[in-house]
Image (cartoon, rainbow, N blue to C red):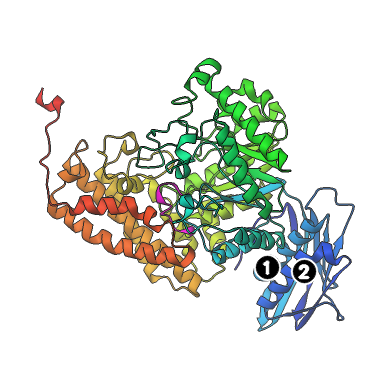
Amino acid sequence: MVRNQDVFLPSPQKWSRQPGGLTLSGEVPIRSESSSSSAPAVAWLETQLRSHGLRPVTDGVGPGIELVLDASLKDPESYRLRVSGAGMRVEGADTHGLFYGAVTLAQWWSHGSEPLEEGTLRVPGLTVEDAPSFSARGVMLDVSRDKVPTLETLFSLIDRFAGWKINQLQLYLEHTFAYRGHEVVWKDASPYSAEDFRQLDDYCRQRCIELVPNQNSFGHFHRWLRHEPYRQLSEVPEGVKHPFGEEIEPFSLCPGDPGSLELLGDLYDQLLPNFRSRLVNVGCDETFDLGLGRSAEACEEKGKERVYLEFLHRVDRLVQERGHRMQFWGDIIVQRPELFAELPKEAIALEWGYESDHPFAEHGAQFAASGLEFYVCPGTSSWNSLAGRSDNTVANLVSAARQGRAHGAAGYLITDWGDFGHLQPLSASYLGFAVGAALAWNAEPRAPLEKEHLAALLDLQVFHGEAPGLGRILYDLGNVYKLPGAVPKNGSALFFLLIFSQETLEHRRFDGLSEEGLQKSRTVLAEISGRLRELQTGSSRGALVQAELLWVSDLLTLGADLGTARLQAGRDQPLEAVPAEVRRTLASRLEPLLERHSEIWSVRNRPGGLQDSQQRLRRLAELLSAENELSPTISDEAQS
């Protein structure tokens, strides 16, 4: 039995079941006053009717579906929906409103109606009045570190997002677009082409989604600057140690070098014409090395934030000259609120933060006071974890929605990153996508966002009833991050044990790590794996998610065993201090996991990036397989 609160995703602002209803069978007429305005809604309804064994027609007699533009609906994208014995009527404020009414109606067929026999539905009465909490409701996918999803994967995600009333999509770019003349940067990355983006733009537009171009344009430029001749444009040509790579390499463009703007102008000229959107996200976040090299004197004289602001204005001019409006990450300028008044007036600030306690309220108030349009940008918490961080995911998304709404944010952008090899499977992000989409449309849903409800919601709205219980498994697996004792920011201890195998356990990310916590992690992972193996999946999609989550559980279990062995060897000891026999056993378990990772990767993603993705796990395999064995050293404190 489907509970009322699970019928829709997202939940409408106002809706109620009504007496009566109608039975759909055979042909179902779809009538519209304006073919251009209703085209996306009609296409969606036709697909959904056919999935239920019904035949959509444009004429015919009897109760059907009416699509009507209604000028009395003042809020953009708003709609009204009524289902009665006389038929189904969608009234929309605009094209998007008609489409979202159609989306809600299709969910009612799927989850609120009763299938009587093949090709026949009993549809109960219904009234809905609905409008979004945020005008911009977006998802940003990291396609640069290191996964480049296939077009088929993206088309499937776009359909999912459209069905959840998402209206913007961004693909985060560093180096994964095939820029002409810059082949050395992207040649091994399986990049997207201009034709790929034009296809995606068309596909999104047909589903009322704006595909927003995205190219990081200041920091996070190391994929370019490691190569000649780009190195000469960097802030620190000799390189710096930065959080997103193992090598000493340049990270940010030099803001004072005219060549930096010349390069960006070339990139924008090649990228932007493939999109209908007039927005562009230029990034410009995490400029860690600003002031450490060629701009040191300017930063000393003016302050780093003002040097940053001056470069941001130059980038804004490049964007405006090409007829676009700039979005930028707000993490640098928020450190100097007194400079808000000097930001480009038409720009959109993106206020990001990924922990449950991120200060969305404080920063939202600052951006609101500045008069600058801004989005709140929480995350799926999937990255640096393999399995996600379920409780943190929900708390972070809820906080962003409530505080964004309270402070007048224009948009809500759900981010999904791929730090340190994008090792997590796509299914680890499903909880964040679903909850984020629900909150972007309705920031105050009626149903409490608690584990039991969300598990049922995932089963119905994400997995479509194909594998009952999979939603609870996904949520529980995503909460294993809380068990090892160490609960680091922006990731999980089990993930970091695998990825930072060259470090000792004295790093703060392992504070609190205990053998008891690792044993608890193993116990819960074994129980989850058992449930996964017993699961009866009803489709290849369900079987893929099952395989992905089993791989995640097995790799996290290896991380727990590795952590135990390292604690027993000593927190201050390198991995080589673990007895060779123990290391060899762990290595023998890691190799087949790497093979499974390659197999899972190839189902949803292009091949470029796979080698980079696995490099840290390969390094772990090498350390585990090394023949030498170190004797634990006696610390200076013990000697004294």
**Where residue 531 sits: x, y (%)?**
38, 65
Q: For the magenta stretch, what is the residue range?
A: 418-426
Q: Residue at x 25, y 54 (%)?
A: 621
The residue shown at (79%, 53%) is: 78
Which mark lies nearer to you, 1 or 2? 2
- The residue pinned by badge 2 equals 42
Q: Quadrant of the C terminus?
A: top left
What secondary structure is found at the residue carrying circle 2? helix
**Is 424 contained in the magenta span?**
yes
**Disc 2: CA contacts within 10 A as few (<14), some (14-19) or many (>=20):** many
Residue 356 is left or right of residue 485, and the answer is right
Q: Residues within 10 Å of mark 1 (few under 14, many from 20)?
A: many
Q: Amino acid at mark 1?
A: Gly
| Residue 583, image x, y percentages | 18, 53
Residue 87 in view: yes
The span from disc 1 to disc 2 (Cα, nearest Å) is 21 Å
Q: Quadrant of the N terminus?
A: bottom right
On screen, residue 265 above or below 26: above
The x and y percentages for residue 564 are 23, 47
Mark seen at residue 112: 1
Q: Quadrant of residue 198?
A: bottom right
Residue 312 location, x and y as percent? 61, 31
Q: Are marks 1 and 2 in contact (CB under 8 Å)?
A: no
